[in-house]
Image: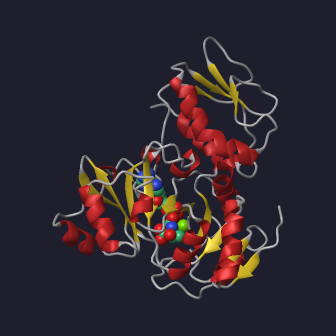
Amino acid sequence: MQVETRLLTPEAEHLAYAAMRLAQGHLVAMPTETVYGLAANARNADAVARIYEVKGRPSFNPLIVHAPDLPTAETIGIFNNQAKQLATTFWPGALTLVVPLLPESGIASIVTAGLDTIAIRVPAHPVAQDLLHAFGGVVAAPSANLSGRISPTTAAHVMGGLDGKIAAVIDAGPCEVGVESTIIGWQAGRPVLLRPGGIPIEAISDSLGQAVTLPAANMDPSRPAAPGMLSSHYAPQASVRLNAKAAEDGEFLIGFGAVTGDITLSATGDMVEAAAKLFDTLHRADETGRPIAIAAVPSNGLGRAINDRLRRAAAPR
Ligand code: TXA
Ligand code: MG
């Protein structure tokens, strides 16, 4: 779908316009101190699904949610003492913290890819701050580039990939840091480095008075070390059968298009709707305790990412 992408400058009227577009479920590229981010209302599943659509991402990785400050971050995540210490020391700044998701956060499940943790960061860039305040909510924002391309550090980079696909780009000049944020999470109560980035790991270890290590999965050579790795994704307890036309003995059927299930990803075959509902639907199916069957979903557009996720859900484990 071709849209007119407005190139905005960081003055108040333009930011009010960008905030309005976010509230309407549209995508806006915003400057941050690390790289330009492609922002969507993190509480609007369809809007977040469109991030995947316009980036042409072949899989669903959990996304970073951007908040204006720590008190707002505490309305979506649960901060232990170490997380609070790091937030107080490094926010606003190039640090992302992966913390338990607050159950009543209202964050769309496609943001966390169905996980019960959430990645949160408070950006330091004054324009990102102004936009978040004007919007009055929190935004999911991966780097504003096409999948597989270089992260954008200028508005021109963003326009090069996304012109005609998103509502607006706010041009605030080049990003200062130029690499993505450092991501810290906790495993068995210990701080781990999930992605090196704009803040050196030594500074984080110093602040905690404790060495931050690599996550356990990264030290096991038989398992992939890349972020968004398989093991970090939500997988249903039950067995999953793909390309189902009808339910077989006791199965809970997830429909799509003409296949009407116990529940459907999209009765009309709408890929944005299907992506937006995917993780909630898997959770709901799993909660029945029955084996799960899922109708075929075509592989065009967002279908690639949906099918990637479904194949992982169905993989033997
Ligand atoms: O600098 C940045 O962080 C940029 C700017 C735009 O703010 N944003 C960015 O966002 O890089 P994104 O959404 O592309 O980063 C996603 C990374 C992935 O590596 C993903 O695996 C990790 O965050 N991540 C997100 N949620 C996670 C979770 N619950 N558990 C583990 N890793 C998570
Ligand atoms: Mg990226």
In this image, 65 relative to 147: left or right?
left
Q: Residue at x 33, y 54 (%)?
A: 79
**Percent x, y of residue 158:** 66, 77
| Residue 7 rendering spot, x and y as whole percentages | 73, 81
Residue 192, given in percent of the width and then of the height, sits at 29, 58
Which residue is pictured at 68% across the width and 18% down the height?
247
Q: Is residue 78 visible?
A: yes
Judging from the image, the colouring scheme is: secondary structure
Q: Is residue 23 left or right of residue 127?
A: right
Q: Position of residue 106 (x, y in %)?
A: 54, 47
Is residue 20 or residue 292 the one in the foreground? 20
Assign ligand 2 to one image quadrant.
Answer: bottom right
Residue extending farthest to the bottom is: 173
Q: Nearer the viewer, residue 129 or 3?
A: 129
Q: Where on the picture, by quarter, is residue 181?
A: bottom left
Q: In the image, is residue 196 above or below residue 33?
A: above
